[in-house]
Image (cartoon, helix red, strand yellow):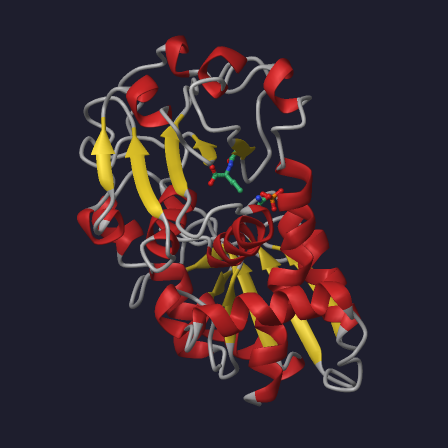
């Protein structure tokens, strides 16, 4: 594996899931692989799970880790080509990415969607610029349109908890008062379309995801109907793709409650976290045995370790 930016960088999903499960059962088996190798973790946005799990995974593989918060630790970075840099950005990504690539063997980047310009966000300007100028492999820590390390952890979790050969997996929109990216929902949908699952997406009208991510999923606007007989409920808020970056509704009836979970077939509740309790999902659900959000978050370490092992093997 060279880069890990989109699903297309994954040669074999089942093999990668198995690598993650192997790492979980024997986390230090490959400690020599990363010896004297360094990964740079570059954050344009906040993080708990991605930051800690990726650092832990790198350390499990014997790697050194350097973490940088752009704008707080480092200079603000200009992404546009050919501009006169007389604004608040002191450094161009051309130099910054190239210099980071001189210090690090792998560069991992988190840069959320701006949610103002759909064409710019969906062209993945930041991720593309780092891939163009870093000179070393790039790993996606959540970009404008995808969160592949999260999606691999989600696949590992579903593999661990599935009790049927082809479980029903439901991605449900959840209410939120401010616009959030489509990246997690896009990525989950992209990866579920490659899993042996009955995949359903449910959301209010106007929250349709980009067609390239929806794929063969069934889209149902009636949440209760979608929940019927489900084995996994994956909750996530996202802002409108069609009316880009807009919050079209905050309808609290879309919050996941235990009554809704009773419509499922003893379904497990999943969420990438962070989650706002009693706005997106009730305490009752999150504190019940049906919630596997902590196990899901724990699998972020094994997702990152499987990916970093693959990238290290390609160096
Ligand atoms: C892992 C999720 C990160 C981010 N969540 C928030 C709250 O900004 C999002 O919705 O993309
Ligand atoms: N799920 C996830 O990526 O969490 P953080 O934003 O805390 O890293």
Specify whether 61 is left or right of 256.
Answer: right
Compared to 260, does 130 lie above or below?
Answer: below
Tell me which residue sits at (41%, 29%) in the image. 237
Specify whether 116 is left or right of 86.
Answer: left
**Where in the figure is residue 211, as x and y percent of width and height?**
18, 48
Say which of 198 and 238 sits in front.
Answer: 198
Say which of 74 and 118 sits in front.
Answer: 118
Is residue 73 visible in the rendered structure shown here?
no
**Where in the figure is residue 45, as x and y percent of width and height?**
55, 45
Tell me which residue sits at (40%, 40%) in the image. 169
Q: Residue furthest front?
A: 164
Say which of 140 and 201 sits in front.
Answer: 201
In the picture, the quarter occupied by the C terminus is: bottom right
Is residue 162 visible in the rendered structure shown here?
yes
Tell me which residue sits at (50%, 54%) in the image. 155
Tell me which residue sits at (53%, 28%) in the image. 266
**Where in the figure is residue 160, as x and y percent of width and height?**
60, 52
Q: How many labels, in total?
A: 0
């Amino acid at each position: 594996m060279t880069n890990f930016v989109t699903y297309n960088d994954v040669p074999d999903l089942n093999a990668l899931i198995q690598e993650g499960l192997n790492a979980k059962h024997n986390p230090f088996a490959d400690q020599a692989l990363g010896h004297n190798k360094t990964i740079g973790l570059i954050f344009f946005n906040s993080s708990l799970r991605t930051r800690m799990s990726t650092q832990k995974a790198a350390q499990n593989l014997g790697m050194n880790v350097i973490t940088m918060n752009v704008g707080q630790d480092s200079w603000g970075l200009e992404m546009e080509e050919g501009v006169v840099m007389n604004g608040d950005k002191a450094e161009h990504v051309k130099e910054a990415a190239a210099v980071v690539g001189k210090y690090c063997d792998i560069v991992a980047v988190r840069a959320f969607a701006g949610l103002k310009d759909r064409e710019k966000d969906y062209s993945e300007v930041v991720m593309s610029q780092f891939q163009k100028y870093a000179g070393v492999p790039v790993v996606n820590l959540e970009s404008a349109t995808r969160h592949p390390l999260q999606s691999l952890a989600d696949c590992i979790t579903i593999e661990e908890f599935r009790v049927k050969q082809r479980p029903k997996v439901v991605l449900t929109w959840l209410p939120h008062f401010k616009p959030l990216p489509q990246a997690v929902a896009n990525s989950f949908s992209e990866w579920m379309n490659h899993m042996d699952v009955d995949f359903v997406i449910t959301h209010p009208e106007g929250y349709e995801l980009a067609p390239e991510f929806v794929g063969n999923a069934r889209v149902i606007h009636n949440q209760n109907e979608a929940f019927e007989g489900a084995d996994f409920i994956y909750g996530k808020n996202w802002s409108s793709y069609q009316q880009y970056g807009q919050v079209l509704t905050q309808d609290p009836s879309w919050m996941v409650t235990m009554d809704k979970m009773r419509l499922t077939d003893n379904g497990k509740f999943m969420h990438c976290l962070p989650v706002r309790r009693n706005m997106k999902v009730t305490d009752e659900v999150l504190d019940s045995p049906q919630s596997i959000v902590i196990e899901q978050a724990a699998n972020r370490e094994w997702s990152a370790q499987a990916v970093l092992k693959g990238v290290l093997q390609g160096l």
